[in-house]
Amino acid sequence: MKSYSKSKMDSFSEHHINLDAECTVQIDADHIKIKYKQDGEHYSYTGSSIGPGHYNLHCDGYPECRATLHCFEDSKVLEGSWREEQSQGMWRIRLIGEN
């Protein structure tokens, strides 16, 4: 599993934009894990592949939170959508700091 410890995440919703948030990404062909801190809280999204470069995720500890991420082969950018309770939006993660 590849790990990207200095990745940057952009998140967009109807009322909020958050750019260049730090996150950690662990990814391989079958699984993905995203960890980040927002407003003093730690979050972790875990997911499984639903096809090459396509992942369905859920937020650990928050069953109502779901997300998707997609990427092309050998790409360093993941893009997708998320839904957290009544909010929804899009996110983009740039994979940086491969370990």
Image: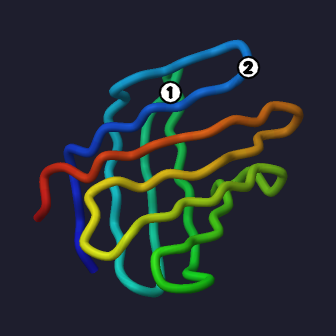
Give left or right: position of 58 versus 95.
Answer: right
Quarter-wise, where is residue 50 in the image?
Answer: bottom right
Q: Are marks 1 and 2 in contact (CB under 8 Å)?
A: no
> Which mark is nearer the camera, 1 or 2?
2
Type of amino acid under label 2: Glu
Type of amino acid under label 1: Gln
Residue beneath the point at 64% across and 69% down: 56
| Residue 1 % position (x, y) | 28, 80
Tell me if residue 57 comes above or below residue 61 in the rendering.
Answer: below
Number of other residues with Cα within 10 Å of mark 1, as a class: few under 14, some 14 to 19, many 20 or more: few
Tell me if residue 23 comes above or below residue 28 in the rendering.
Answer: above
N-terminal label among 1 and 2: 2
Give left or right: position of 69 versus 19.
Answer: right
Number of other residues with Cα within 10 Å of mark 2, as a class: few under 14, some 14 to 19, many 20 or more: few
* Circle 2 SS class: loop
- Mark 1 vs mark 2, CA separation in Å: 18 Å
Quarter-wise, where is residue 67 in the image?
Answer: bottom right
* Residue reaching furthest to the top: 15
Which residue is disc 2 drawn over?
A: 14
Quarter-wise, where is residue 78 in the image?
Answer: bottom left
Give left or right: position of 24 versus 56.
Answer: left
| Residue 64 % position (x, y) | 84, 51
Tell me if residue 85 comes above or below residue 71 in the rendering.
Answer: above
* Circle 1 SS class: strand
Tell me if residue 88 comes above or below residue 64 in the rendering.
Answer: above
* Residue reaching furthest to the front: 72
Residue 38's tag is 1
Q: Quadrant of the C terminus?
A: bottom left
Residue 84's tag is none
Residue beneath the point at 57% across and 79% down: 48
Residue beneath the point at 32% across and 34% down: 22
